Amino acid sequence: MTTKHIPELISFNVCPFVQRSAIALIEKNAKFTTTYIDLKNPPDWFADVSPLGKVPVLRIGDAIIFESAVIAEYLDERYAPNLHPTNLISKAHHRSWTEFASDITNNMFMMLYAKTEESFKELQSKIKKQLHQVEQVIDKQGPLFAGEHFSLVDAAYAPVFLRLDLVDQVYKLNLFEYESRLGLWSSELLKRNSVKASVVDDFEEIFFSYNKNSGGYLAEQIALNDQV
Ligand SMILES: N[C@@H](CCC(=O)N[C@@H](CS)C(=O)NCC(=O)O)C(=O)O
């Protein structure tokens, strides 16, 4: 194992889990390269570097690190500044709520591509409830999860807020009020340089094009709104 190599982030351009890794790398001002693959048609070498067949993967020389939470921990240990609190309980608390972000991310993914109105609405209310749960534990003043300092848990929620915000511009999800504490957190994350720089320039276009091609309930609603 060596750390002299520049990390290579193996990515899929709309993946929220990859975005977490990119945000952490950028926050840490680390040099890295990004290799994009098409998950629907992955290159032959992908199976050799991704035991679970998923992105993100971080390749450092011959070493392979997979799972976004593990990548985040590695980056935090390797590069300053520290994006975890030092207090052990606070650190574990951040990790727990990062796990929670993974559940929201998966529900969001299923909502974006849900085939029926019923499943879409079910997931929409599940996410609304989950966001309300997070709102109970975030720092009261903000603007970020733990107050003023950016942490890895912020990197896990930013991809969720980014996608919900894009959808909200064309189809009102009504998941939280923009004037609420969650709204403040979301807008703070969305204007952050690391978050903006963590996705490809044409992210919005690509994101909506995947959604449109899914033929799901949301795509149908967006198309209907377009006709109005
Ligand atoms: N638990 C994984 C989830 C990563 C994940 O689900 N990535 C998706 C793309 S956003 C993927 O690679 N899916 C391919 C598949 O499941 O076959 C992590 O946190 O890294």
Image: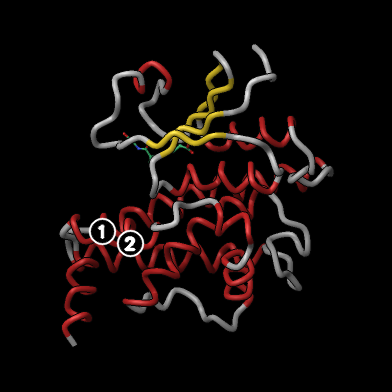
Q: Residue at x 76, y 64 (%)?
A: 147
Q: Position of residue 128 (x, y in %)?
A: 45, 69
Q: Residue at x 77, y 58 (%)?
A: 149
Q: Residue 146 vs residue 50: left or right?
A: right
Q: Quadrant of residue 29?
A: top right
Q: Which residue is mark 2?
A: 205
Where does ligand 1 appear, by image quarter?
A: top left
Extreme residue toward the right, this view = 87
Extreme residue toward the bottom, this view = 228
Residue 209 marker: 1
Q: Amino acid at mark 2?
A: Glu
Q: Residue at x 47, y 67 (%)?
A: 129
Q: Position of residue 203 (x, y in %)?
A: 40, 57
Figure check: 31 above or below 65? below
Looking at the rendered structure, the secondary structure element under dot 2 is helix
Residue 97 marker: none
Q: Nearer the viewer, residue 206 or 48?
A: 206
- Indicate the quadrant containing the C terminus: top left, top right, bottom left or bottom right: bottom left
Q: Amino acid at mark 1?
A: Ser
Q: Residue at x 56, y 54 (%)?
A: 197
Q: Quadrant of residue 40?
A: top left
